[in-house]
Amino acid sequence: MKKTVLTFGLIGGAIMAAMMFATLPFMDKIGFDKGEIVGYTTMILAFMLVFFGIRSYRENVSGGWITFGRAFAVGILITLVACVCYVVAWEIIYFKFMPDFVDKYASYTIEKARASGASQQAIDAQVQQMNSFKALYDNPFLNAAITFVEPLPVGLIVTLISAAVLRRKKAIAAATDEGRVAQLQAQ
């Protein structure tokens, strides 16, 4: 299981990290709204490797059958490895290339509040919230924890769906194999 988890988890994490680094030069042009769409789309694509990882484990290690629990375990471990890669990439980007990220994001959210016609009291509350957000993000451990939670729900959903779709009981796997044998003998 270790080889499957590391292989598919590192590939998924590499996809998310590569996309982060690839979009970094265009961040000002992409904007925060579209950047969020690009980011979550990339996460969904990267977490498709959870499906392929579970399927690979089922076919190559588990003899063609896998329970929901084992499939979930393989999938969530792949998800965790990919999330760690995502966190490492973000920590490098934030602290080395974009230390002003929170300032830009704060300006964006405050301008958005002003443009929507929010009261001065609501804008002041937004400013206060952004100041506390910056204090959290400047701590590397809290930054890592917040960043880890970002892709985790997406990976969890993909893991649950994949485990449910790919589970196969031993009897079904044996019947499928027998059907293949009978089909080959008929030819």
Image: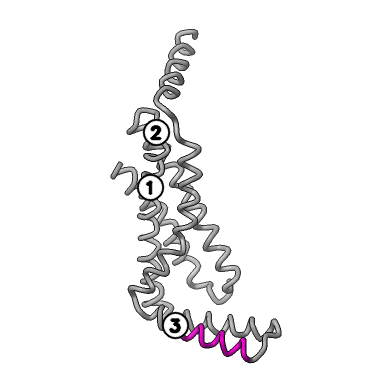
Q: Label 1 sits on what residue type? A: Phe
- Disc 1 target residue: 8
The crowding category of the residue bearing disc 3, from other C-alpha atoms within 10 Å (few below 14, some 14 to 19, many at least 20), is: some
Marks 1 and 3 in Cβ contact (< 8 Å): no
Report the Cα–Cα distance between label 1 and label 2: 18 Å
**Residue in the foreground of this view, choosing between 60 and 150:** 150
- Disc 3 target residue: 134
* Residue 32 sits in quarter: bottom right
Colour style of the rendered protein structure: one colour
Marks 2 and 3 in Cβ contact (< 8 Å): no
Element assignment for label 2 = loop
Q: Position of residue 21 (x, y in %)?
A: 44, 67
Q: Which residue is at 39% across, 37% downward?
A: 56
Q: Position of residue 93 (x, y in %)?
A: 40, 72
The question of residue 130 being in magenta is answered with yes
Report the Cα–Cα distance between label 1 and label 3: 34 Å
